[in-house]
Image (tube, rainbow, N blue to C red):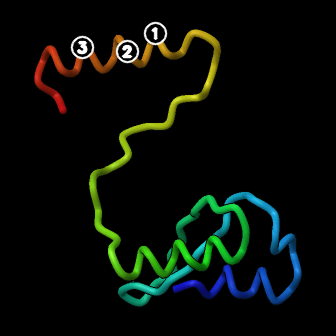
Amino acid sequence: MSDIVDRVSKEGRNPGKPGTYLVEYEHQGGRWGVDLWAESYDDAHARMQAIRESGKIIGRLERRLPALPGIGLYVRFVCWWRNLWGRA
């Protein structure tokens, strides 16, 4: 599961810098990937181990909103609206 993270470390591409580490896995005959933020390669590896041991799906990402000035008010309004009409 941590195939890509291992290759990045072995090739020496910023193995000690914080950032997004790419993880690749195989499922139902296809190759898939996810990303995870970590402080370093070792931290990414530890997080992958934690995912293996206790990871669970807690929901589905609906959308990503850019961090623009004033976006907080928009997010509050959308949450209020969806809660008002029962769309969770």
Instruction: Choose the circle earlier in sequence order: 1 or 3.
Output: 1
- For the point 58% across and 84% down, the residue is 2
Q: Earlier in the sequence, mark 2 or mark 3?
A: 2
At horizontal 48% and vertical 81% (from top left) the residue drawn is 49
Mark nearest the camera among 2 and 3 is 2
Query: Which amino acid type is marked by label 1?
Result: Leu
Quarter holding residue 57: bottom left
Left/right placement of residue 3 relative to residue 76 reads right
The quarter of the rendered structure image containing the C terminus is top left
Give the image location of residue 41, x and y in percent: 71, 75
How far across and how far down the image is residue 84, in percent? Answer: 15, 14
Disc 3 target residue:
81
Residue at disc 1, secondary structure = helix
Q: Is residue 37 above or below residue 24?
A: above
The secondary structure type at the circle numbered 3 is helix
Residue at the spot of label 1: 73
**In front here: 25 or 45?**
45
**Residue type (three-letter) at the residue carrying disc 2:** Arg
Q: Residue at x 88, y 81 (%)?
A: 12
**Label 1 vs label 2: CA separation?**
5 Å
Q: Amino acid at mark 3?
A: Trp
Residue at left 42%, top 74%? 51
- Residue 76 disc label: 2
Q: Are marks 1 and 2 in contact (CB under 8 Å)?
A: yes
